[in-house]
Amino acid sequence: MKSVSIDRFGFLLHDAARLLRRRFEMRGSEYGLSAAQWRALARLVKFGPMPQARLADLLEIEPISVSRLIDRMEQAGWVTREADETDRRAKLIVATEKSKDAFSAIKAIAGDVYENAMTGLSEAERTAFLSALATVVENLSDSDGAPPSSMWTKQTKR
């Protein structure tokens, strides 16, 4: 196993995320969705309908950018905007059946990508690695509220 100095931590983490995204985009390109659209779709399918502002928070992008993203996804039949029964001024973004069907398929693609990424790691190394990443996210999270990524840190097992 290679020895890695702590000063390479940020570069390695960034490169790993970039390469995972690239591999995922290559494998999932048949659906015609951008990485940002896949991230939006995943959160909507996993967590259900939500206001556009909440989705923007989860994606860590500006609300105006989410608006354009949702416009394109709505035109392609991936999501709908529906009235929020608790707030007449707001609309909820809702994943369509098309999204739910694609999400099931894309989960399998993601599983293959993750499995490929972890090739060569024992089960104990995988568990330790995922636990360590969850700890890093928790350590860097703001204490004044749940950050968008915190919902993923508790799920270290696949």
Image (cartoon, rainbow, N blue to C red):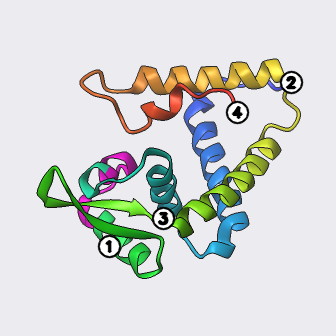
Left or right placement of residue 44 versus residue 143 in this view = right
Quarter of the image holding residue 1?
top right
Give whichever of discs 2 and 4 has the lower sequence position: 2
**Quick one: label 1, few (<14), some, or many (20+) residues within 10 Å?**
few
Left or right placement of residue 58 versus residue 82 in this view = right
The answer to whether one can see residue 17 in this image is: yes
What's the mark number on residue 37?
3
Which of the two marks, 3 or 2, is nearer to us in this view? 3
What residue type is disc 2 on?
Ser
Which of the two marks, 2 or 4, is nearer to us in this view? 4
What residue is rendered at 78% in x and 21% in y?
Answer: 125
What residue is rendered at 84% in x and 29% in y?
Answer: 121
What's the mark number on residue 68?
1
* 124, above or below 145, in the image: above
Instruction: Identify residue for label 4.
Output: 158
For label 3, the SS is helix
Main SS of the magenta segment? Answer: helix
Instruction: Identify residue for label 2.
Output: 122
Residues at marks 3 and 4, CA–CA distance in whole angstroms: 23 Å
Q: Position of residue 23 (x, y in %)?
A: 71, 58
